[in-house]
Every structure is written in structure tokens, then in C-alpha cells.
């Protein structure tokens, strides 16, 4: 199962008790790793509803757009769970500067970061993290494919799909 995070677009599959929901597209609101489920929002017949679905019954079809996407409502500098970050400005452990990782969870003003190059986790103050931008010169960011499914969140640029 792919790592899901808030804003990802998923397709429901393999439900046996409620097969009428199979094939429906939804958007992840939050993920409960311990319970192995996700709360998603779906839109059917113009009505929005939320439902909890086991992770094994969800297929990731589109990832949330990066925060640097030029759109109203998405702040460029905001860090969110699952985004790629780079450590910077750390003076006490300067050897960490420049390392990249994934922001996993927030605890007050610090983020739990899974380092990309090593199997290590660090608690890093958010002032020492920068979000990796789509236009980052390192070129290590995966190219985004064209979005197909509208978002349920008006702050997400995918919300405009099928609205124009």
C-alpha cells in the first residue's frame, strides 16, 4: 500500500459488505496508521459525505499537489505531513544541513522527519526546514502528471477541474 496523506485522491476497491462504493473516487481527509484506515470524503449526486475505509481497500490515483503550486489558498512555505523537506540553518549539528527527508508528524513547533538517505528519524524545529519546491534545481522531484479528478477542497487547485 502506498503512503497516503491528506489531500490524496483515491479509488475505493474490494469492498464486500458495501460493493456499491467500489470504484468511487474520494479524497483523503486523514489516515489512521494504527487502525489501518483512512477517513475520506466522496461526492455522490452532488452531495458530499465522509466515510472510513480500510487502507487495503484504497488505491492511490493522484497525489496531493505540492505546496509550491501557484494557486490561491495554498501557502508556498507551509509544511504538511508527507511533504519533502530539506534541513537548513542547523548550527549545533551542521552536518545535517542540506539533507532531505519527508515530514511525518508535527509536535508543537517541531517535525518528525524521516531522512531520505538513511534509515534515521529526527525531530527538527520547523524553522530549520524548507519545503522542496517543484522548481528546485536539484531536479530530484518526480514530475507531476496531469490531474484528472477534482478535489473536494476549494483551496486545492484540483478543485477547478470540471468547473470551467
Image (cartoon, rainbow, N blue to C red):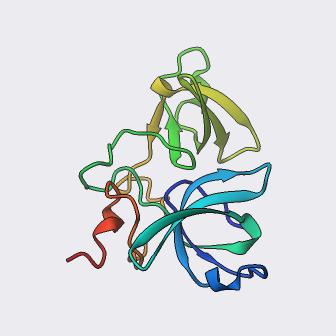
Give the residue at x 41% y 64%: 152
Find residue 31 and report its horizontal and vertical position in percent: 65, 53
Relative to 110, residue 49 above or below: below
Give the residue at x 44% y 47%: 132
Find residue 29 and report its horizontal and vertical position in percent: 54, 55
Relative to 129, residue 36 above or below: below
Find residue 4 and report its horizontal and vertical position in percent: 62, 59
Q: In which quarter of the image is residue 71?
A: bottom left
Q: Quadrant of residue 76?
A: top left
Check the image and name the residue furthest to the top. 92
- Number of marks: 0
Relative to 92, residue 10 above or below: below
Give the residue at x 74% y 79%: 15
Left or right: 13 as drawn, with respect to 44? right
Q: In which quarter of the image is the C terminus?
A: bottom left
Give the residue at x 38% y 77%: 146
Residue in front for this viewpoint, 59 or 140? 59
Amino acid at each position: 500500500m502506498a503512503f497516503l496523506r491528506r489531500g490524496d485522491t483515491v479509488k475505493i476497491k474490494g469492498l464486500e459488505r458495501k460493493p456499491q462504493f467500489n470504484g468511487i473516487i474520494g479524497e483523503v481527509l486523514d489516515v489512521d496508521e494504527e487502525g489501518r484506515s483512512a477517513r475520506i470524503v466522496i461526492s455522490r449526486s452532488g452531495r458530499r459525505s465522509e466515510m472510513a475505509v480500510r487502507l487495503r481497500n484504497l488505491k492511490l490515483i493522484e497525489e496531493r499537489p505540492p505546496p509550491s503550486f501557484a494557486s490561491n489558498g495554498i501557502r508556498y512555505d507551509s509544511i504538511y505531513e508527507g511533504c519533502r523537506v530539506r534541513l537548513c540553518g542547523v548550527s549545533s549539528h551542521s552536518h545535517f544541513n542540506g539533507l532531505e527527508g519527508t515530514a511525518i508528524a508535527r509536535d508543537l513547533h517541531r517535525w518528525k522527519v524521516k531522512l531520505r538517505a538513511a534509515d534515521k528519524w529526527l525531530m527538527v524545529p520547523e524553522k530549520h526546514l524548507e519545503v522542496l519546491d517543484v522548481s528546485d534545481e536539484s531536479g530530484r522531484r518526480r514530475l507531476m502528471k496531469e490531474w484528472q479528478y477534482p478535489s473536494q477542497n476549494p483551496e486545492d487547485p484540483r478543485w477547478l477541474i470540471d468547473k470551467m
